[in-house]
Amino acid sequence: MFNILTLNKIAKVGTNRLGDNYACSDSVANPDAVLVRSASMHDMEMPESLLAIARAGAGVNNIPVAKCADEGIVVFNTPGANANAVKELVIAGLLMSSRKIVAGIEWAKTLKGNGDAVGKMVEKGKSQFVGPEIKGKKLGVIGLGAIGILVANAASDLGMEVLGFDPYISVDAAWKLSHNVKHAQTVDQIYAECDYITVHVPLNDSTRAGINASTIAKMKDGVRILNFSRDGLVNSADVLEGVKSGKIACYVTDFATDDILCEENIIVMPHLGASTPESEDNCAVMAADQVKDYLENGNITNSVNYPALSMARSGDIRFCVMHKNAPKMLTQILDCITSNGANVESMENKSKGEYAYTVVDATGADKGVKESIESIEGVIRVRVIV
């Protein structure tokens, strides 16, 4: 029996996939895994029983990823599960940034109570909400992951000229990108050429506050900027100054901060990107499936702190070893397993930065081998699956 602790409401379509061998609730003791959405885990004491954390979403800022790696706890996320939901909201934001839809709606509300005169008042006042069409305009997409690709393709289908920039784009992602999307050689090319810019990159030290006074100065006058990725990617004070000066025609974001609320030409949404039932279901299903496969088979898919590794079962016992990415580790692990006459049926090893993961299937091995492997310097955690 595996114990699964839920720190947020997780869609039942996901938790139901775990099966009868799982106890899943928000109060379970000694959890083998945690399913979480937005709850912060940075101050949480990690129990010794904890093997995995699955974030039902892409971002893992609410999880102490490095600490988990040191303790042999695999952190999963669900990239792409909410991609369509975010894409649709970005396209809505793109249109709202151009057509002054939000301002127009708010103005129309002020006409309440004018009876038959409302129609004439609308015709007289609507000119103040004139805005350009997006067709034929140039959109720059910074970051071509699951969401960025969908946004780029959708904008191209709407008749925009799209430039994409991502120095780390994967081969699989490139295959999904429309042939109409042009490759920007540098991010400065996006700044210099694009009428609209949307950001779809993870938040880390290299991307934090990437949209700032310096980069805004490189952009076209009247640029429209969209941020549906992470709050910290944009220096809100610099954007506010850019809007007030007229350099930025409109800023649309899914992340509310006090300084930009109620400001003209800034549209702030209450983090609605993944707030669809379809997205929540997709994330829950992916998170549950990844946890189940790891707990039962030791396979890792979509981890942010350990390498991806999936291997079909063979032999009668499986050793899953989390260790530092150091020389001679494999030799020592295999010596521990084979020294008592066990036969290695299959083995796979992958690394990610300073951490590595080794899975060995063997026949005739003693379970006591676990303690021998644990004694190797650099080994973080050992699991035995039968």
Image: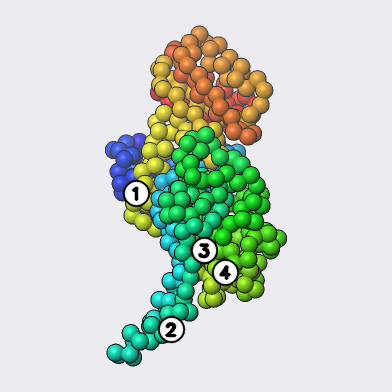
Kind of residue at badge 4: Ala
Q: CA distance from mark 4 to mark 2?
A: 20 Å
Kind of residue at badge 2: Gly
Q: Residues within 10 Å of mark 3 (few under 14, many from 20)?
A: many
Q: Quadrant of the C terminus?
A: top left
The disc at residue 125 is 2
Q: Which residue is mark 4?
A: 249
Instruction: Judge by depth and name the residue closer to the eye, 246 or 337.
Output: 246
Tell me where residue 383 appears, x and y as whole percent. Answer: 49, 28
Secondary-structure class at tag 2: helix
Q: Which residue is mark 3?
A: 253
Q: CA distance from mark 3 to mark 1?
A: 24 Å
Q: Earlier in the sequence, mark 2 or mark 1?
A: 2
Q: Earlier in the sequence, mark 4 or mark 1?
A: 4
Q: Earlier in the sequence, mark 3 or mark 2?
A: 2
Q: Quadrant of the N terminus?
A: top left
Q: Which residue is mark 1?
A: 281
Secondary-structure class at tag 3: strand
Tell me where residue 298 appears, x and y as whole percent. Answer: 45, 30
- Check contact, mark 4 vs mark 1: CB within 8 A: no
Q: Earlier in the sequence, mark 4 or mark 2?
A: 2
Tell me where residue 91 appears, x and y as whole percent. Answer: 44, 58
Q: Residues within 10 Å of mark 2 (few under 14, many from 20)?
A: few
Q: CA distance from mark 3 to mark 2?
A: 27 Å
Tell me the mark number nearer the camera, choosing from 4 and 1.
4
Kind of residue at badge 1: Asp
